[in-house]
Amino acid sequence: MSMTMAEKILAKSAGKKESEAGEIVMANIDVAMTHDLTGPLSVESFEKIGTPKVWDPEKIVIVFDHQVPADSLDAANNHLVMRQFVKEQKIKNFYDVREGVCHQVLPEKGHIVPGEVVVGTDSHTCTHGALGAFSTGIGSTDMAMVFSTGQLWFKVPETIRFEIEGTLGNYVSAKDVVLNIIGQIGADGATYKACEFVGSTVKEMNVSDRMVLCNMAIEMGGKTGLVEPDEKTLQYVNARSNKSYEVMKTDLDAPSLETMHIDVNELEPQIACPHHVDNVKPVSDVDGIEIDQVFLGSCTNGRISDLRDAAKILKGNHVSDSVRMLVIPASREVYTKALDEGLMNTFVDAGALVTNPCCGPCLGGHVGLIGPGEVSLSTSNRNFRGRQGSPEGEVYLSSASVAAASAIIGKITDPRNIKF
């Protein structure tokens, strides 16, 4: 039987030879991740179940990233709950406040390899599909069952395969590609589907750029994002993990497969406008909108490639006096690389604020919130009303290059039109 990647991975995890879209399978979980914000509810639910020990302390990964360091008594209490759980359950893979955003830390630390089933109590867990794993977000109570049994049921999803072809122009990136796709199909256009990203454009992308595509699969309703593993994937994985793995690829004649063709040759930088991620417009349509804050970071665009893109534009320039710019590396590894390359000097010299690796204002619960009437231009993945602070504020989403150019000008700006 011909199958998609998602069908093959879920079949294997369920101990079956085959699975098909719509079927319910009980999957064995390879990696289970939770963090400081959603973890305490998972722990509370786990304790109510009454299972004395987690199913496998080496397959659980706990990352503090949403409110780090603790910015309130509630956050501090959440940290205490999770630290105690780590100690009691002898959780091996625990990353306290110093390490960074979970969706960046897990791949960096070698926890993700092709062919695995990965779950996390965060909707953007789909990021890890960039390495060929079936990775998806689940609720905290579902995670309690995973902690207890190591298993979880799934309805096998259909697959929509985005065949992306063409050469990206100057200052056009993976973020622009995925925003354009979301704008075309809508926030519910891939509901409960596995979103595969393939084609010549994807082949040219590095692993970080592929993570951007998979990260935002959830923003079109997807169950997971996936990129078929190739040599770039395996080089990344082999350098970071000693786990065994199996590479799986989609059979093009799989019955549940739907294909959508995307041509990016003429694509210009894209902007998601308030208050919906699928309210996407080319930057030329919104050029000149005044902004109050620029946020460079998050699990979408806080990687070293993003910091490099922004630093190239900011070097020798200065952030507008009317704008505050926050630069938040996605992980300690990214932070260290940026230091070694002198990027941090560039940001500080330009007048940006650099903070510790964390989620920052992305979730609307930590540093860098916007006030009533303020406008944020953000490289993160969501622009819902109130997402980054006041419900009376507005959030636009862009790539790192657009964010940097706009920070200098003080307005949403197409970097292709400016000489830096």
Image: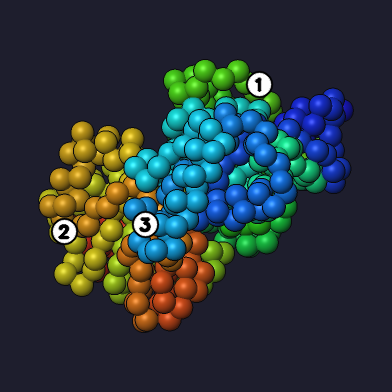
Disc 2 or 1, which lies upstream in sequence?
Answer: 1
- Residue named by callout 1: 246
Q: Indicate the colouring scheme.
A: rainbow
Place residue 190 in its image quadrant: bottom right
**Cα–Cα gap, marks 1 and 3:** 39 Å
In the rendering, at what x and y percent does residue 184 appear?
A: 61, 60
Q: Amino acid at mark 2?
A: Gly
- Find residue 183 and report its horizontal and vertical position in percent: 57, 61
* Badge 1 density bin: few <14, some 14–19, many ≥20, Cα 10 Å: few
Instruction: Look at the image and tell me in which quarter the N terminus lies.
Output: top right
Which of the two discs, 3 and 2, sits closer to the camera? 3
In this rendering, does residue 350 appear at all?
yes
| Left/right of residue 196 with respect to residue 4 in the rendered view | left
Report the residue marked by disc 2. Answer: 351
Q: Position of residue 264 (x, y in %)?
A: 51, 47
Q: Which residue: 44% across, 20% down?
A: 239
| Quarter-of-image position of residue 208 | top left
Question: Is residue 324 rendered to the left or right of residue 68?
Answer: left
Q: Nearer the viewer, mark 1 or mark 3?
A: 3
Determine the secondary structure under disc 1. loop
